Amino acid sequence: METVTVKIRPHAETFTAEEDAALRRAGSIIQSGGLVAFPTETVYGLGGDALNRESSRKIYAAKGRPSDNPLIVHICRLEDMEKITCRVPQEAFRVAEAFWPGPLTMILHKSGLVPTETTGGLDTVAVRFPSDKTAGKLIEYSGGYVAAPSANRSGRPSPTLAKYVAQDMDGRIDMIIDGGRVGIGLESTILDLTVSPPQILRPGYVTEEMLSRVLKEIDTDVTILGTDSGQAPRAPGMKYRHYAPKGELTIVEGCSDAVIQYINGQTAAKQEQGERTGVICTSESRPRYSADAVKCVGSRGDEESIARNLFSALREFDDECVTKIYAESFEAAGLGQAIMNRLLKAAGHRVVQV
Ligand code: AMP
Ligand code: MG
């Protein structure tokens, strides 16, 4: 299959006639059962018609994703939520009012309209209303319900640029909409509203603290940062290997000087063994590293920058054939919880304390 790429100006709010025509074409591809990758405010999504079981099967095949790992259904109007769900609790409307459109996914009971292929066999459905205008227009032109997991091959870091979508999906899907670099860089927060109290299944840009402003009580899935809880995560997808670069990634925890000294010792030794080494660090420590590839994800206090640059740093290591990677650790509060959740999974929970 030939994969066509079309360009939309990054973070466009309105569209030129040419862009609008491209989005209509993308919408008609989805309506006729094809797949289109598109930018959202979080990461690039791989979109197909959420109400068409064949489209969902194609998404699993293109990603190489296990079919029990459910997809998120993207909508572009709040009123559409009620057509694909049932028994929606009052809290869901409060959460929607506060955070939609935006980087938050709600798990709700599904209606008969949604095929179980889309929900990985579950009787619940994940629903998100993205704020990105390109995503919104595409969803509208696609008929209103777009199933869209992240547009990477299963297990790989989520794409934050169209070129990373192409690396994984070229020849497997019909179209890529290139809308430049995404804004947030980590996937949406997932909140399960089918349990009481509501439970965070995946941390993201919308933090527990932000949610607690509209919900009296919230639980967090204990497996989010844990390594040996012995419990299976409640979001089925979270049990799989995720976000992994090709090189072996180790997170190093400890006080800053000890971390830098340890990483420099490791990278020097690995270089001698012929490995290509990489480091994920912050602007404060960058000048002190001597690995082959040193990726600064931003300043330590700027978590939004760290979130935005993390997945692209992991992809760049692959581009540069890095085989051993060491990452500094980050505070696991606020947005840091989402950052550490992704980093720990990317590292397969390989953590060294120094
Ligand atoms: P991705 O599409 O790559 O962002 O992954 C979507 C995540 O949403 C996966 O971890 C899924 O397990 C989770 N998810 C989707 N639908 C449900 C659901 N009905 N119940 C629980 N988790 C879900
Ligand atoms: Mg994903």
Image (spheres, rainbow, N blue to C red):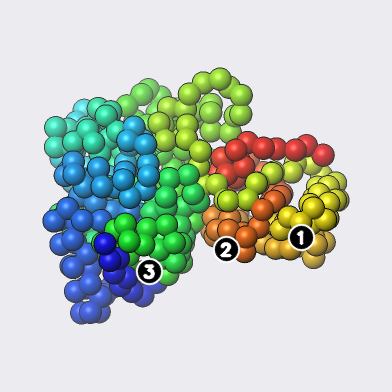
Residue where numbered disc 3 is placed = 179
* Quarter assignment of residue 314: bottom right
Residue most toward the bottom? 17
Q: Which mark is residue 142?
A: none
Q: How many marks?
A: 3
Q: Secondary structure at mark 3?
A: loop
Mark 3 and mark 1: Cα distance apart in space: 32 Å
Image point (74%, 43%), residue name: 252
Give above or below for 88 relative to 21.
Answer: above
Few, some or many C-alpha atoms within 10 Å of disc 2 (few <14, some 14-19, many ≥20)? Answer: few
Q: Earlier in the sequence, mark 2 or mark 3?
A: 3
Image point (67%, 37%), residue name: 350
Give above or below for 69 relative to 130.
Answer: above
Q: Is residue 189 left or right of residue 313?
A: left
Q: Nearer the viewer, mark 2 or mark 3?
A: 2
Q: Quadrant of the C terminus?
A: top right
Q: Secondary structure at mark 1?
A: loop
Q: Amino acid at mark 2?
A: Asp
Residue where numbered disc 1 is placed = 291
Q: Earlier in the sequence, mark 3 or mark 1?
A: 3
Q: Quadrant of the N terminus?
A: bottom left
Mark 2 and mark 1: Cα distance apart in space: 16 Å
- Residue 223 x/y as whole percent: 53, 28
